[in-house]
Image (spheres, rainbow, N blue to C red):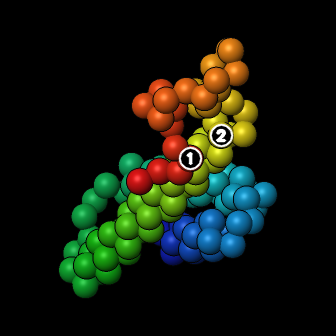
Amino acid sequence: MLLEQLQALLDDETECLKSGQMAELQRIATEKMRCFADIQSCMTAASQPSKNSSADAHLRNLLNEIMRKNQLNGQIISALQRFNQGAWEIFFGAQPATYSGLGTAKSSAERHLIGSA
């Protein structure tokens, strides 16, 4: 079933994010988008509601779990982007300089601390 395949892809994506295997994320993202497209086309083709209420409940539960996992993975990716952006700014000078053009230290109000709250 496509939804179970999507759920497995989201689990793989979570594991890659946790373990730092960023090279594998591109393949998973491509597969995930293909799976989303396949699900979308199936939903438009079969828009008739099922007569089996237990199957509908299982489908709703599966969809809720998929949405939860996708949201969690998105939050992890956003946190990683913020961390990387902060590191980039520290290493490559996007932060305001600690010293003035004359070589004197700027006041603490004029510069930012490393890290975030």
Q: Quadrant of residue 91?
A: top right
Q: Position of residue 103 (x, y in %)?
A: 70, 21
Q: Residue at x 73, y 33 (%)?
A: 92
Residue 36 in sight: no
Residue 115 in sight: yes
How many tags in the picture?
A: 2
Q: Secondary structure at mark 1?
A: loop
User: Is the residue marked by circle 1 packed among few (<14), some (14-19), or many (20+) residues within 10 Å?
Assistant: few
User: Among all residues in the image, which is located at the extreme right?
Assistant: 23
Q: Quadrant of the C terminus?
A: bottom left
The residue indicated by pointer 2 is 90
User: Is the residue marked by circle 2 packed among few (<14), some (14-19), or many (20+) residues within 10 Å?
Assistant: some
The residue indicated by pointer 1 is 114
Disc 1 residue type? Ile
Q: Residue at x 38, y 63 (%)?
A: 67
Q: Residue at x 63, y 66 (%)?
A: 17
Disc 2 residue type? Ile
User: Among all residues in the image, which is located at the extreme bottom?
Assistant: 54
Q: Quadrant of residue 43?
A: bottom left
Above or below — where is 16 with respect to 46?
below
Q: Position of residue 80 (x, y in %)?
A: 58, 54
Q: Are marks 1 and 2 in contact (CB under 8 Å)?
A: yes
Asked whether 110 or 62 is in front, the reply is 110
Asked whether 74 or 79 is in front, the reply is 79
Above or below — where is 101 with respect to 36?
above
Q: Residue 58 shows which numbered tag?
A: none
> How far apart are labels 1 and 2 at the CA level?
7 Å
Q: Secondary structure at mark 2?
A: helix
Asked whether 49 or 75 is in front, the reply is 75
N-terminal of the pair, mark 1 or mark 2, is 2
